[in-house]
Image (tube, grey):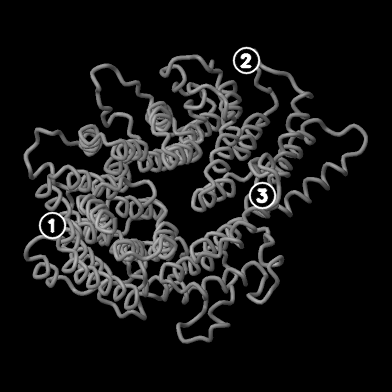
Amino acid sequence: MLNNQNFIDAEKAFRTLLNGMHGIPNRFDKQEATIGLARSLREQTHEKQLEACSILEELRLDGKLTRLGASTISNLDLCLSLCEEALGRHLDAETRLLRLRKKMRNANERALCEPSHYYAADISNARLWQLMGKYTLAETLLLNLKTELIKNLQSKPYSPATSKLRRHLDTVNMALMRLWQLMGKHQKAELLMLDLIGKRPDDDEDILCRQSDHKDVDLALTFIWRALGKHKRAERLLLNMSRKHPDDSEEILCRPTGHRAIDMALMRTWDEMNKLELAEKLLLNMSGKRPGDSEEELCKPCGHHDIDLSLALIWQRKYKYIRTEKLLLNMSGKRPGDSEEELCKPCGHHDIDLSLALLWQRIYKYIRTEKLLLNMSGKRPGDSEEELCKLCGNRESDLALVRFWELTGRYTLAEKLLLNMSRKHPDASEEILCKPCWQHDIDLALVRCWQLTGKYKLSERLLLNMIGWQPNDSEEIPGKSGGHDVLYLALARLWEMMDKPERTERLLLNISGKHPGDDEDSLCKPSGNHDIDLTLARCWENTGKLGRAERLLKRGCEFYHSNEFELTLLKLLTGQEGFMEMVSYYPESANTLVAKSIHYFSLACEQIIQDNPESGQDNLHKALEFVESALKKYPPIAGAFSQKAHCLRMLGKSEQEWREWFDRAEASDSSRTYRAKTHLWRNREAAALQKLSNLKE
């Protein structure tokens, strides 16, 4: 039952076993049944995870402890560490695993990363370090494990344990691949997977996209290629695995293969390539539906949780919000006409409840959003600040509530909940506040919360501590060695907001594997990381290196096939002579219409600054017409919402009117909150607004 993930049935079976052990039960049987019960409880609710810890702690009292404090009962401490990990007690889980591996917490890195010859504890420790953001430790331990397993296989190729050792090696290789992807070392991950199936990066496309005998490795390669922006290659391999061809009809392309992992990987690839129609049709076919079915049939769950949830998210991407809401409500056992109380009652499936809350947030149903999130956390809107900021036991729910409070301007609540999640007190010293809690997503959320409230020094210090880098007097910039691309990118964006352009550029070049002295061609070559390249292009734009920014953006458009790159490039060219001719070479889209709006907006700002407000008003009205056309003709994008707000503000509309459109932009794309607003056209806008204000006076 455990192997088939039937956790509730497994729990009942283990309880029955334990209750049936009359008299003096066999100690080994009791231990096995208790650990089995704990394993089944661990995968359920917060309360049951607490119960799992409690019964394991009680069982520990029946056995002896090693010199370092590890239980001698087989698998007990390993299971207990996983329960602690599930509850977010990462430091407790780490301490327990180190004891199992016979390591001292204060040992040096080399000692900590030496294999202990207890494989299950070693691999669990590596995964925990990955979860805690201690990537270097996780990487070193996995590489040492791999070396040891290969050495054992080579020394005893015909041993009875060979099959088991090979399975362990496969597990280590896949764990290493996933870790390298998290660290942004996608090329290393690619080399590892290609080596496992006897291929090389310089093989021709036909060979690279040929299906191997190892489905898991092939699927892993498609994930890596997607991360590297090689979506066409990923699509081609997945089509080969599906026995399809790119030139097949849409009907054949969207026919399920029966291998759900392959079908879902293909759907996600199409989603990222913006081939939403193909992604939707494949999901409909997988759920036994057709595009022409009635609304009632389309929104009926098919019974496969991952398919239903993916279909809801695709509809949300296509702005089919009514249909998305209806499917999610059906999955929750609710109906649109139910009372507010019923609609905001959790259904018990966390991912469905969270998806529904985030949908309501996206479509500005904020009262429902908060009510559902609070109900999921066992709280009520009228609770005291202390109660509201207590942990609910589910990290995703707590973080969603933090994000909602940030969106609605309740930063004190957001910060207090994050500090509680980090086990810190608001009145603690700066040193303690900026010490990582080693739960990566919580630490990063706190960094961003402090950014929103202007506490840049705290954000910077926490980020630097997470990276493990202490600045010295020479203002040295950290290099690529740590591999924390997400952290480095967050630091670069923070420095951009703190108006440190030189440091921002040097850091972005370092993590791209580039140097300020490189030639233009090397500097403007895509690094393979979409977000780093886009941030670097924006940095160059903001520091006046427009030619370099334009070149990187053009090459990024070809490499990533990204809407963000296209829109950023068009924004860069706005206000220039001949812009309208240049943009005419692009097919009309929401991006081109928003870019035209920004172009006329920039011209209007220049005219207002040069004491020609009447001509400026004409161009402002043109700017508003173009952005409203984008919102009317195409699915809305965050940039269009924001641009309309800029136009309305410059035209003198009420703050309530233009503020609503900024709020929509932020709800549509939360990452906008953390970007520096330093584009050159924004500087012109500020000057024009000041000029208009002076004229009114």
Which residue was labeled with disc 2? 68
51 versus 691 height, above or below? above
Counting from the top left corner in percent of width and height, residue 657 is at 42, 65
Pointer 1: residues within 10 angstroms few (<14), some, or many (20+)?
few
Q: Say what amino acid the circle numbered 2 marks.
A: Leu
Q: Tell which residue pokes out farthest to the top in this image.
A: 67
Q: Is residue 248 left or right of residue 526?
A: right
Task: Please identify, in this view, whether the residue under mark 1 or under mark 2 is nearer the observer.
Answer: 1
Q: Position of residue 114 (x, y in %)?
A: 44, 21
Instruction: Give the quadrant of residue 79.
Output: top right
Mark 2 vs mark 3: give the one in front: 3
Q: Cα distance, mark 2 to mark 3?
A: 37 Å
Name the residue located 28 percent from the left edge and 39 percent from the top edge.
496
In the image: residue 96, left or right of residue 656: right
- Secondary structure beneath dot 3 equals loop
What residue sits right under mark 3 in the picture? 377
**Left-right relation of 255 to 55:** left
28 w.r.t. 604: above or below: above
Circle 3 packing at 10 Å, graded few (<14), some (14-19), many (20+), is: some
Identify the element where label 1 is drawn: loop
Q: Label 1 belongs to which residue?
A: 610
Which residue sits at x=15%, y=33%? 515
Cα distance between the residues tagged 3 and 1: 56 Å
Query: Dot 2: what SS?
Result: loop
Q: Amino acid at mark 3?
A: Ser
Q: Residue furthest right?
A: 23
